[in-house]
Image: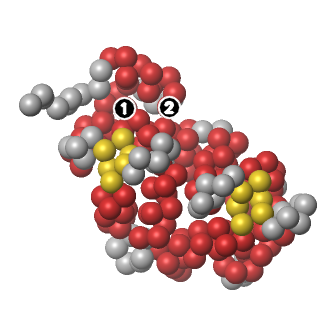
Amino acid sequence: MGKRQSRLRRDELERLSQTTHLTPKELKKWYRGFMKDCPSESLTKEEFCKIYRQFFPFGDAERLASLLFNAFDTNGEGSVDFHQLMSALSTAMNGSTEDKLKWAFRIYDCDHDGYITRDDITNMVDSVHKMAGSMVDIGDTDETPQQRVARLFESMDKDGSGRISLSQFVEGAKSDPIIVKALSDYEDL
C-alpha cells in the first residue's frame, strides 16, 4: 500500500494560491487541519454535516449543511476534497460581490437546474432559521421569513416566470441592502 500524501505538492500549492488568493502559508495551515479531520482526503456529506453541527449545537443544522455540501461538491461525486473546500471558502472570504452571489445562487438552486424557485428560497430560509432560530440577524426589519421570501422573490422575478435566473438573482441581490451587508460580513473571516 502506498503512503498517503501528507502535504501539498508544490505545483498544487501554487495553483491553489493563484485561484484562492490565499498565501501558501495559509493554505498549508488549512491543509494540516483538513488532513487531521479528513485523513481520507475528502469529506462525505455525513462527515460534512457532522462537522457543521458542531458549530450550531443548539439548532438543527442538518438541512443547511446538506445544501451547503451540495454547493461545495462541484463535481457531484458525493465528496468534497481540499481543492473544492478551499475554492468555496475563498469565494466566501475573498471573492468579489459578483463571485459571492454566483456561489450563493448555487446554494439556493437546490435542484441545479439553473433557476431558483420560491420553494428553493423557502427551503434555504427555513434551513437557516432551523439552524440558528432567533440568533439569525436578518437586518433591521420586522419581516417574517415567509414575508421576506415573498418580497425577495417578487423583486427578483422580473419576468413573472415563477423562477429566478442567475442574472436576475445577481441584479436583485446587489440592490438589496440586507444581502449586500450579509455578503460584506464574510470579508473578515
Residue 115 sits in quarter: bottom right
Residue 128 image position (x, y, % from top left): 54, 71
Residue 185 image position (x, y, % from top left): 59, 53
Residue nearest the viewer, comparing 81 with 135: 81
Residue 163 sits in quarter: bottom right
Q: Are marks 1 and 2 in contact (CB under 8 Å)?
A: yes
Label 2 sits on a secondary structure element that is: helix
Residue type, mark 1 in image:
Leu
Query: Which residue, given by chain and number where applicable, does mark 1 sit on?
Result: 27
Residue 54 seen by the camera? yes
Q: Crowding near pointer 2: few (<14 within 10 Å), some, many (20+)? A: many
Disc ID at residue 71: none
Residue nearest the viewer, comparing 133 with 119: 119
The N terminus, quarter of image: top left
The residue at 49%/66% (across/down) is: 64
Q: Crowding near pointer 1: few (<14 within 10 Å), some, many (20+)? A: many
Examine the rendered structure and indicate whether residue 156 appears above or below residue 78.
Answer: below
Query: Which residue, given by chain and number where applicable, does mark 2 sit on?
Result: 20
Q: Is 111 placed left or right of 154 in the picture?
A: left
